[in-house]
Amino acid sequence: MTLSVDHIHHIDRRITNEGEAFASAAGSNAQSMNLWVPSERVSSHWIEVPAAPERKWAELIPWMLEDRILHPVADMHFVMAGRSQDNQLHILAVSKQDMQEWQRIADNAGVAALCMVPDFMVLPWEEGRITVGWREGLCLVRSGATEGFAASPDIAWTMIGRLLKRSEIAPRLSISIPDQSLIPESLREMADINDAAVDWVFTEMPASLNLLTGKFKPIASKASRSAWLPAAALASLAIVLLFAYLQISSNMLQGQVQLLEKQVVSGYTKLFGAGNIKASDVRPVGEQQIAILFGQQQALQTGAVAGLTALDQFMSLCGCSLVALKAEQDNITLSIDGASKLKVKALNIPGYQTSITQLPNAPADSILLTIVPRGGAGR
């Protein structure tokens, strides 16, 4: 989510006699914002990286800058803004009183400040160019990726001139100022000049130079916490409802599973006539039973048993009686009495050869019927 951005001076103008009442009333609904603060109240320094461990730098840096700062170091707030390739630290220094005043202004305007950055950083920058802007009688100057200042025009032009002389290759100069007559002739000839105003709202704010660190680091406001309470309550309710839904669904599925298990066991019992079996055993035991039935079916369709089955159609209503039956491998021999009707029938059994002989010393209607699979005679 993109946060609102504005200058602390614009926020300060919100505060009127009515604004004080507005601020106190809006305390529970503070607007989170990033704020630009006056660069003339912030000093920029480069120091050698301390030889001590990094965890002790915060204690050493104030005393390393003691001779460069006009105020007692105990009254100053220091921010490590970066580290150069030649092993130097970039330090921003601002008085604690200014920090407290800016936070007070934000609070009174109903604003929760999450970031405060020196306002010279609002200017665009590119390598080899110095950019100058204008803010209410002061020149904003950006001379590097994280370097710049704010000063009255006479001081700003002098400092820009020193920057130009100190550079081996003179940087280009871009100046945006409402009155070009304020620019010295020496700079006017070499500069790109326009009257564009600084856009405080729609400019990206770099977080690397945020002054709100250490004891001034923003703490999540009560407004922010209270704003999350409804969302947290809804999230908790959603989780509870989801858990209840899953529990109910699980119980319903469990009931359906139990019903299906009973149906499976009942079906198995009806098919195979076996009871007292677990649902988990139905599949393996059922597969075994089916395999046995398939084996029996194959046995009935092959060999002597298949021949006897085929012979059944000829012996029906023949008025004969079976006296004896002898089976050797696939050959079957039947002794039959009263087979006068059977003798006159054509005993054509597919896949088998049949032969009828008279039983010796027996009535004429007593025969010996032999059934042999084709290709198996004489085996």
Image (cartoon, rainbow, N blue to C red):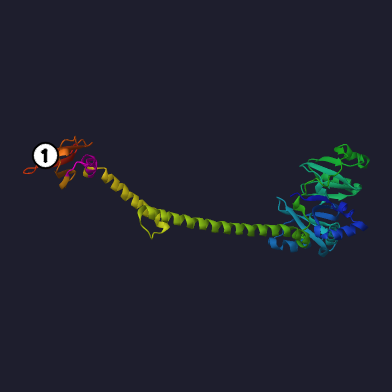
Query: Does the segment drawn in magenta span residue 199?
Result: no
Magenta-drawn segment: 305-320
Tell me the quarter of the picture where residue 263 sits. Answer: bottom left
Q: Give the secondary structure at mark 1.
A: strand
Q: What amino acid type is highlighted by mark number 1?
A: Thr
Q: Is residue 372 above or below residue 288?
A: above
> Is residue 68 visible to us here?
no
State the image coordinates of residue 289 (x, y, percent, origin top left): 34, 52
State the image coordinates of residue 140 (x, y, percent, origin top left): 85, 47
Residue located farthest toward the bottom when viewing the structure as drawn: 74
Left or right relative to 324: residue 146 = right
State the image coordinates of residue 343 (x, y, percent, origin top left): 15, 37
| Residue on which the image places disc 1 | 357
- Name the residue rendered at 62%, 57% in the picture: 242
Query: Does the segment drawn in magenta span residue 308?
Result: yes
Of the pair 142 and 86, the residue shown nearer to us: 142
Q: Dot 1: few (<14), some (14–19), or many (≥20) neighbours within 10 Å?
A: few
> Is residue 310 visible to us here?
yes
User: Which SS type dominates the magenta stretch?
Assistant: helix
